[in-house]
Image: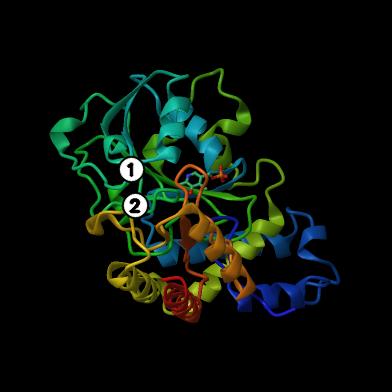
Amino acid sequence: MERVYNFSAGPSMLPLPVLEKAQKELVSLGSTGMSVMEMSHRSGVYQNIVTEAETLLRELMNIPENYKVLFLQGGASLQFSMIPLNLFRNKKADYVNTGSWSKKAASEAKKYGEARVVASSEQDRFTTIPELHRSMFDPEADYVHITTNNTIEGTCYAEIPDTGHVPLVADMSSNILSEVYDVSKFGLIYAGAQKNIGPAGVTVVIIREDLIGHAPAFCPTMLDYKIHADNESMYNTPPTFAIYMAKLVFEWLKDLGGIPAMEKINREKAKLLYDFLDESEMFQSPVAPKYRSLMNIPFTSPSAELDKKFVQEAKAAGLETLKGHRSVGGMRASIYNAMPVEGVQKLVAFMKEFERNNR
Ligand SMILES: *Cc1c(COP(=O)(O)O)cnc(C)c1O
């Protein structure tokens, strides 16, 4: 079976060289005679894998010394709870509402204290990102929460807001490693792995050290950042295979030239699709140009019937998972790091032909 171009929003494509390397090492990793999945997480071989994964991520994202890198479980969704649990001291935080995921993050935080929505793009049906100014944030807030890339709505911050001394917390699940970010502007960055890092099962948390160690006494041990930081993500059995795969993805990204090189390719891919959407008479992007995501590109045709036909015929042409999210409708092409330029070129060529045939 030939591989397809998979535009899934997550879990999503992994780089083929990574899958092939994992396949080669699956039954016996190096000279160990066992699979990485069968190995003790306390073994020297496995310890090296975790250390290497962290070192590579630090290098790729240029993570400063005073930040910890944690490999956790529970997805980005568990971070919606862990963040207020660990960071609340004044028991209030400011949330920016830019889509379904930020909404979920805010409503979870409300269980622990005050989660104030300081700005929202809901009135624009989430096709924009609100303009933010430092004066909008409560200086007493424990943190400000943003979602850098809105996976479902296809929007992305054009610039990172200035929150003054209030730590900025970012859900980067769908655009971590896709463009250069200055980690020092954030107090905490988190991301579920299954979009740009590796398979589902591991969640990366990058946290400034001064934000660790303030969890209340009732905080479950497994939800306390300090426990995971003190034990180097090895308090209990970590998701060993997922971390190993993440390490292979980090190596692949480093060989490609790191995040600056990746960002250049991502901009090229997104431009191909947006340029076509802007000239097409059939397909349209609902998102304001300034806030268009490089990773998730929703688009619409004039009717639900055409949408359906498009998704079916695209699948037959080897272009899969293009159906839009149920809350937005239409189509969505997720073009994460692992999607090659050729995949987007094929998609645009297919869209042009579809438009000609269905005028
Ligand atoms: C996918 C996604 C989530 C949810 O991630 P899980 O790992 O499934 O919990 C949260 N936030 C954003 C921005 C996402 O794209």
Residue at screen point 62% across, 79% down: 17
The location of residue 134, given as percent across then percent down, is 16, 37
Residue 65 vertical position relative to residue 106 in the rendered view, above or below: below
**Residue 82 appears in view:** yes
In the rendered structure, find residue 126 and report the number of the disc placed on it. Answer: 1
* Left or right side of 194 for 267: left
Instruction: Please tell me which of labels 2 and 1 falls first in the chain.
Output: 1
* Left or right side of 98 for 60: right
How dense is the environment of label 1, judged by Cα within 10 Å: few (below 14), some, or many (20 and up)?
many
Could you tell me the amino acid type at mark 1? Phe
Disc 2 Cβ-to-ligand 1 distance below 8 Å: no
The location of residue 318, given as percent across then percent down, is 61, 74
Residue at numbered disc 2? 155
Q: Secondary structure at mark 1?
A: loop
**Residue 8 appears in view:** no
Q: Secondary structure at mark 2?
A: strand
How dense is the environment of label 2, judged by Cα within 10 Å: few (below 14), some, or many (20 and up)?
many
Q: Nearer the viewer, mark 2 or mark 1?
A: 1
* Left or right side of 269 for 78: right
261 or 132: which is nearer to us? 132
Could you tell me the amino acid type at mark 2? Thr
The location of residue 224, given as percent across then percent down, is 54, 32
Answer whether labels 2 and 1 touch (C-beta < 8 Å). yes
